[in-house]
Structure formats: C-alpha cells, structure tokens
Image (tube, coloured by chain):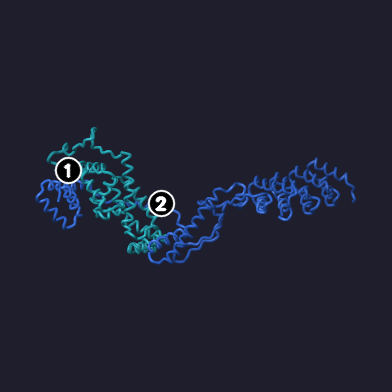
Chain colours: A cyan, B blue
Amino acid sequence: MDGPDRAQDRAHARAPEMELIREAQAGSRAAFDALVRQYEQQVLRLALHLTGSEHDAEDIYQEAFLKAFRYIGNFRFECSFYTWIYRIVTNLCLDQLRRRKTRREDQAVVVDQSGDEIDVLASVSDNRSFSNPGKELDRKVLGERIQAALGKLTPRERMVFELKHYQGLRLRTIGEMLNTTEETAKNTLFRATKKLRIQLAGLR
Amino acid sequence: MNCELAHERIVLAAYSELPDDQTHELDRHLATCNECSREREQLLALKTLASAYPVLEPDPHFVTRSRIRLEEELDAIPPKRWYERFGQRMLNNFASLQAAPAAALLLLIVGAGAGTLGGYEYAQARAAHTASHAAAQAAARGDSSTTASAPAEVASISSIVRQPNSEIVDVTYDQLVPQHLQGSLDDPAIRQLLMLASENSSSPGVRDDSVGLLAAECRAGHACQGEGIRDALMVALRYDKSETVREKALQGLEPFVAEDMRVRDAVLEALLNDSDPRIRSAAITELEPVEADTSVRQVLFTVANSDHNPRIRTASREILSRAPVIQ
C-alpha cells in the first residue's frame, strides 16, 4: 500500500488537471481522488460558510463529489473544471437553502414577536462597542445578527452575495456557475446588498 | 449620471467590478452628490459588518472525515461497463468534432451501437424478472449461484486474469439467465425442456409435473418415441427419489410394455427393486399382458417367494398359476 501508491499520488498531484480529468473519465479512481483533493478544501469552506453547519456542509460535499464522479463523463472541457465543480456545488447549496426556507428551521432568534429586529448591540453597549471584555461577546452576537440577515435573503441572493462578498469571485464567473448572465448576477447582488442594509440598519 | 445608476455603480465599485472609466465618472458624481456619498459609506459599513461572520477554514479532521466517507461511498459504486464508457467517450468526441462529417457519422453509429447494447442489457434484465417458476427451474442448473447483484445470476467464475501493468482485469464467468417458454405439448422444444426437467430439476414438484405431462402424452398415444421421451420416463422410473414421480413414469410406460423390450425390462426391474409396494403392485398389473414371457415369469417367481409385501407375493402367485408353464 506504500511505495508505488505514494509515488502515484505524487505524480497525480503534479499532473496537469486536464490529464487527470481524462484519466478519471477513462475510469481511474486514483485520478478522480486526486481531483477531489484539489477541490475539497474550497468546497467545504463554501458549504460551511453558506450553511453554517458542519453536518449540512458534509452532506453537500458528499453529494457534490458523488455527482461529479457519476457525471464526469459528461464534462466536455467547454468550461474550466473549477467552474463545473462549483456549478454542481452551488446548485446543491441552492437546494439546501430552499429546503431551509420551507422548513423555517433557521428563524432568526434575534427577532421579537412582532417581527421587529432587536437592536442587540444597543442593549449590550452604546458607544463602547469594541471595548474589552465585551468585545468577544459583541462579535459573536454581531456574527449571529449577520447570519440572521443573510437568512432573510432569497436563496439566489444569498448565493450571489456569498460568492461575491465572501468567496471573492468575479460576477462573470458567478453568472456561469449559476447558469445565468453576468447582468442577472449583478442585479441579484444589488438586491442582496439593499436588503442587507435594511436588515442591519441601526447597527454600527 | 442619475443617482439610481450611481447606487448600482457604487456596489460594483465596492467589489472591484467597475471598469476604470466608469469609476472615474462615479468619483466625479460622488464629489458633488451628498446622498450618494452617504450611500457609499453605508455600503462600506455593510461590508465591514459582514466580516463579523468570517469565512473559516474547515478543520483538517473534518476534511479527512468527509473524504473517508466519500471514499466509502465511491467504493460502493459498481464500475461502469466498457461499452458505457466507450459510448460516453464517443459522444464526448462527437460533441467536439465540428468539421468531420464522415467520422462524426461513424461515431454516431458506434454510439448508437453502444446504446443498443446497453438497451439490450436492460431488456435482458427486464426479461429475467418476468421468468415463470417451472420453466425457470427447468432451465436452471441444480447448484445455486454465488454473487447476485444483477437479476441474471453468476453461476461460476472460471478465470480471472490481470492485464500486466494496468488496473484492467479480465473475468470469465458463466451466467444463469432465467428464461420463459410457452408452447404446446407437441412442440419439440417444450418436450425437450420437460425431459430435462424430469432429470434435472431439484424440485420434486417440477419433476412430478414434467413426468406427469410426458406420461400423459404417451398414454394418449401422441408421438412418444423419437424424442427419447420413453427413455426419460424409464430413467425417472429407475432413479427418481420421489414415489409419485416414479408412479407417473410407470403409468406413462404402460402402453409400451408389450412392444418394447427395454420398457418391459425397466418395469421388471421396478417390480424387483422399487422400495414402494404401490409401485411394485402397479408394475405387476402392467405386466399381465405379457405374463407368458419367460423373463417375466422368472421375475414373478422370485417376487412370489421373496417380496416383503404379502399382497404382492399373492398377486404374483396368482398370475403364475393362471398361465401355462411352458408356451
């Protein structure tokens, strides 16, 4: 299990991606595994931040790579493999987000009975927002506030904002991944930022 | 530039998506428009706030755990058949082949061939599901199969050869494919299967059915010689473990006791050796037309003296007393 396999792993790590893909298409598990290793960190990072849950992120990771394995034969090198993989992942993420919306599991806890947002920060401190030792608590609460606000976006808005703001992708790439145009991605981003600003109004 | 457009461009600029010339135009607008300047501040504040929910690198243990689980699931997927991969590759090449009509047509035909093969495989799997009980057992061998993920079971694997320096392995195996045949009793194919069933089936019920049918054919006077049906009945009479099967075989042979010496010998043997007294008794009855035959009389004499069953001894003596000793 040692010598020859490790050597093969090293060879695969150096091999250009196109070769790996062709090998994987021909049925090589080792080549596919090498592709997984190249993308798994990014996929998990995205899924984790988007869902906020290790369990959900792992499910998305599994489904994404299993789908990639099943359909790698369909990859025709028309786009980059990166885009192809991300397309699979983002679609699974969108499905996950849609399911959450209908389940209403992630109802923000910082919304009171009448639906008004609680200005949590105001109750914690007024102008000592970033002083110790409350700082950590402030940041944690703030983080939750942000998550809640993000949860109010539509799945597509959430996705575009995630990919643009948090993952730093270009709008044109985001359009490709979501199977739409750059223009549509732009408009989605505008709507997302507008909504978020309304949600987080009063927080400074 | 109106303010609505400016608001949009502010967002794009904040995310470095605004072309340089438009950035310059925006800056000029912001220098004069207070509302839009505030808008820009708000957006930058949003960006800062959003960082309060940072993107974290996944924990290495988490990554490893996920990968291991993935490996397990991938291991559970059966490998693609060669024609599936081949067909897929052909289709991929076809898609990128723009200006080679002849080659493209060839690829299309090959792809269609691979697809047909796949379709055939599918149809075969479907047919396997609709096989009827008796015919399936008649066609199947006695020994059971080993691995069975497909409906057509693998009966035995005769060789496994690994191609040198590759991960490709050649496996030669026999496959058990349940089949179904419907036809009249006159149909030679049906008769063939029935004869096979009389010897080969592991279920006494199936042997019973098949021997019964064959015997009925013989008694009814349908052609019962050429195809070896008589032989099948004789074999069943001699070797079958089930009494009902042997009894039916005996009944089927009755019309031929007089004309066919082999049949007569078979029935005599049954009279001497069969463990079931009912069968021995039936054999005596069937031999009555030929009671004058010396070999028959010899057997009857033995039976009259040594059979365990008193009624059979009596019946034999009775026959012997009726016919004259010498013919």
Residue A2 appears in the picture as rendered = no
Residue A150 percent across, percent down from the top left: 25, 44
Q: Mark yes or no: residue B209 visible.
A: yes
Expressed as whole percent of the image width and height from the top left, the position of residue B325 reads 89, 49
Judge by depth and name the residue closer to the eye, A8 or A68: A68
Chain of the residue under label 1: A
Q: Residues within 10 Å of mark 1 (few under 14, many from 20)?
A: few
Horizontally, residue A45 falls left or right of residue B309, namely left
Which amino acid is tagged 2?
Answer: Glu
Q: Is residue B256 left or right of residue B172?
A: right
Q: Nearer the viewer, residue B95 or B293?
A: B95
Disc 2 from disc 1: Cα separation: 44 Å
Quadrant location of residue B88? Answer: bottom left
At x 29%, y 48%, the residue is: A48
Q: Residue furthest top?
A: A113
Q: Residues within 10 Å of mark 2 (few under 14, many from 20)?
A: few
Q: How many marks?
A: 2
The residue at 80%/54% (across/down) is: B261
Nearer to me, B151 or A30? B151
Quadrant hosting residue B280: top right
Residue type indicated by callout 1: Lys
Residue A110, position in %: x, y? 23, 37
Q: Which mark is residue A135?
A: 1
Q: Is residue B235 left or right of residue B2?
A: right
Element carrying mark 1: helix
Q: Position of residue B166 (x, y in %)?
A: 44, 64
The chain that hosts pointer 2 is B
State if disc 1 and disc 2 touch (CB < 8 Å). no
Q: Secondary structure at mark 2?
A: helix
Which residue position is annotated with label 2?
Answer: B73
Q: Which mark is residue B251?
A: none
Q: Which numbered mark, 2 or 1, is in the foreground of this view?
A: 2
